[in-house]
Image (cartoon, rainbow, N blue to C red):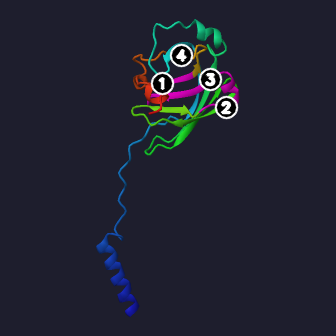
């Protein structure tokens, strides 16, 4: 009998603490966009950037076209594996001219950006120094390959889309913060 009284007491305490009540359906969480996938881009555009990241819209592109004919119209494949739910862990991998490049999350608000922390020996030997892959939540994206200009006074920037256009709201940021150490 004492055993049953303890069981009833235990059940009573469980009910009082809410642990024996019927389960409550959890509130559905917001669904984060899924950006995982494979993306292939053709580097159809060339821009010239100052060493501090500033855009040089009237710079002569001939030198960069002559130095990097293999980059203009080259294909870059990128695989994104990224959890968009905070804190947002993951990475992306690009293949540029047959070389694998690991890209790390950039941590810039309003879009998903990934940037290389250097490149391998093959790309270094071609004076390529940075790869950037950026994506908006609607999956519109931009691939950028940056190389040193022969003059050494600017960077040759090859992209699959023109920067500062209305279809890439997240790409209107200043490259100075990415290229120049504090």
C-alpha gap between disc 4 and disc 1: 31 Å
Provide residue 106's location: percent of width, then percent of height.
48, 35
In the drawing, does residue 125 fall left or right of residue 102? right
In the drawing, does residue 117 fall left or right of residue 138? right
Return the disc, 4 or 1, that comes first in the chain's sequence: 1
Return the disc, 2 or 1, that comes first in the chain's sequence: 2
Please tell me in which quadrant of the rendered image residue 103 appears. Answer: top right
Q: Decide whether residue 42 is among the magenta residues.
A: no
Image marks 1 and 3: residues in contact by CB distance under 8 Å? no
Residue linked to disc 2: 120
* Disc number lying in front (2 or 4): 4
Image marks 4 and 1: residues in contact by CB distance under 8 Å? no
* Disc number lying in front (2 or 1): 2
Residue linked to disc 4: 153
Return the disc, 2 or 3, that comes first in the chain's sequence: 2
Q: Decide whether residue 125 is among the magenta residues.
A: yes
Q: Secondary structure at mark 4?
A: loop
Residue linked to disc 1: 140
């Amino acid at each position: 009998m004492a055993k049953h009284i303890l069981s009833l007491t235990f059940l009573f305490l469980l009910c009082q603490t809410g642990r024996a009540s019927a389960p409550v359906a959890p509130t559905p969480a917001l669904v984060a966009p899924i950006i995982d996938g494979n993306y292939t881009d053709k580097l159809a555009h060339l821009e010239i950037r100052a060493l501090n990241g500033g855009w040089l819209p009237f710079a002569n592109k001939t030198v960069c076209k002559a130095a990097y004919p293999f980059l203009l119209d080259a294909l870059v494949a990128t695989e994104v594996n990224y959890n968009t739910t905070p804190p947002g862990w993951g990475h992306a991998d690009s293949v540029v001219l047959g070389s694998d490049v690991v890209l790390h999350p950039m941590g810039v608000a309003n879009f998903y950006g990934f940037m290389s922390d250097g490149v391998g020996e093959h790309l270094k030997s071609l004076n390529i120094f940075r790869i950037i892959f950026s994506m908006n939540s609607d999956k519109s994206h931009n691939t950028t390959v940056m190389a040193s200009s022969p003059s050494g006074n600017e960077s040759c920037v090859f992209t699959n889309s023109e920067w500062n256009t209305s279809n890439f709201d997240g790409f209107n940021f200043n490259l100075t913060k990415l290229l120049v150490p504090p």
